[in-house]
Image: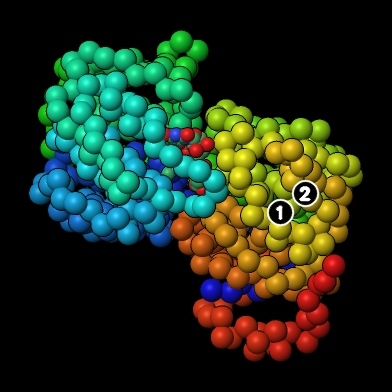
Amino acid sequence: MIALLEKSKVLGEVKVSGSKNAFFPAVGAGIALGAEKIVIKNTPKIKDVFVMLELLKELGCEYKIQSSEVIINAEKIKLNDVSPENFGKIRGSVVIFGSLLGRFENAKIPMPGGCKIGKRPIDQHIKAANSLGYKVEEKEEYVKAYGTPKKEGKIKFDIKTVTGTENAILMSINSKVEIENVAIEPEVQELINYLKKYGVDIRLENKEDKILIDGTKRKKIKEAEFELIPDRIEAGTWLILAAATEGKLKIKNVIAEHIKAVIDVLKECGAKIKIYENKIEVEGSEKYKSVDLLIADSYPAFPTDLQPQICVMLLKAEGKSRIKDNIFPERVSHIWELKKMGADISLENGEIIINPSKIYGAEIEAKDLRSTAALVIAGLVAEKNQTILKNFELIERGYENFVKKLKNVNAKIEVFEDEIRKEEIIKGISNYVPYST
Ligand code: EPU
């Protein structure tokens, strides 16, 4: 799919959809709790969600979608082998590991996938299962865990991992476990809330570095119902997009606290931001202050999932900015594409260096979900020519109705289904001159 983008100033209102990364632990909670019916409200209709639903089907579940509600019938869920191809399409699939251990004390999974943004091992997920007393069989193509988990145990992570923490919680659901060095992203905290709702004694402790879980006294349930929180990365993308295009947006259905680090950076740079209950208003400006060193790290720090997007905005800053992504240092594919548009951006000693630059329409290519969002912003900021963004379909993995939402706020974007039409598209643009450095 190709997106054709042109300089635009966004103006209007946009409503954020339910959180992609909260969907996986919601499914996981339902399975681990032993529910036969799992209802998930406010579910975004995005590709990663549909892949997860396909995987559930492979495990013997059925599902239906009613408006933004997904209803999963997990009565007949079994320990079937799932297809490595589907499992490898997304990262969120990895929570199936903890979910099945929680439900059956037995699980076998192929290797999870997700965006190609650097190494994404699952050693910490395996460490959690080992610590809990499961026998773990690790092969190149799959990981299998089985046996009886300890009634009381301790899991200590070497690094903070989001889905690793989710898996540790899910596999501990019938035991009393202390989990140390946990990730506390809002999606993890939501999983804690999901389980609390159904009688699991679970809480964050020790300045939020530790999770204590005791599921030994919980009651069996037949039905579980969860409502997904708003997607904080979608909300942050709109904030940055509005600021970068010098636009003005009302962003509805957002929990400001979840993107506090993003709001703080944008305010420091000079964007005007007003926070209301459930809504944020943002107004961009022509020039921004640079940031000396922005570090993307575990929550509550600035999220790695917005690092590519903020790079584009910082091209408009008056001085040099530096960004260090401590979570995915190899999440840099957008740099090479922005360079094709004339950006003075580089990678030096593991830091992204961004110098003030005007960017111009060019033919560029997205490589992963968040870089697609960043390059859309670039196409809306670029001077002179239109931008042709290839692999645009990646956006559908994580942003619901993105094109419709963009058009609603005056963004100039057209989407074409296939590569073959590219020549026609270019011909159709009378003033199209690809930018060359
Ligand atoms: N890591 C290990 N070993 C492990 C697990 C993680 O070394 O066993 C490393 C990773 O390589 C990475 C760091 O630890 O360097 C943190 O990774 P984490 O496990 O926290 O990431 P994740 O759980 O695989 C989730 C989100 C990502 C998001 C990251 C970081 C889901 C489904 N995915 O991934 O979302 O970037 O946390 O916040 O929840 C996205 O939405 O575009 C996306 C990539």
Viewer-nearest residue: 113 or 358 = 113
The correct choice, above or below, for 355 with respect to 224 in the image is: below
Residue holding disc 2: 346
**Label 2 CB-ligand 1 distance < 8 A:** no
Q: CA distance from mark 1 to mark 2?
A: 7 Å
Q: Is residue 305 rendered to the left or right of residue 171?
A: right
From the viewer's side, name the closer residue of 127 and 192: 127
Mark 1 vs mark 2: which is more N-terminal?
Answer: 1
Q: Residue at x 85, y 47 (%)?
A: 355
Examine the rendering and report whether any part of residue 279 can be seen: no
Numbered marks: total? 2
> Which residue is at 17% across, 32% downward?
146
Closest to the observer, 256 or 35: 35
Question: How far across and how far down the image is residue 11, in percent?
Answer: 70, 59
Q: Is residue 172 above or below residue 252?
A: above
Task: Tell me where residue 33 sits by quadrant.
Answer: top left
Asked if labels 2 and 1 touch by Cβ distance under 8 angstroms, the answer is: yes
Q: Secondary structure at mark 1?
A: helix
In this rendering, the answer to whether 116 lies above or below 9 is above
Secondary structure category for the residue under label 2:
strand
Q: Which residue bears the numbered disc 1?
A: 335
Q: Is residue 115 left or right of residue 310?
A: left
Q: Residue furthest top?
A: 206
Mark 1 residue CB less than 8 A from any atom of ligand 1: no
Kindly indicate the quadrant of the structure image that contains residue 199. Answer: top left
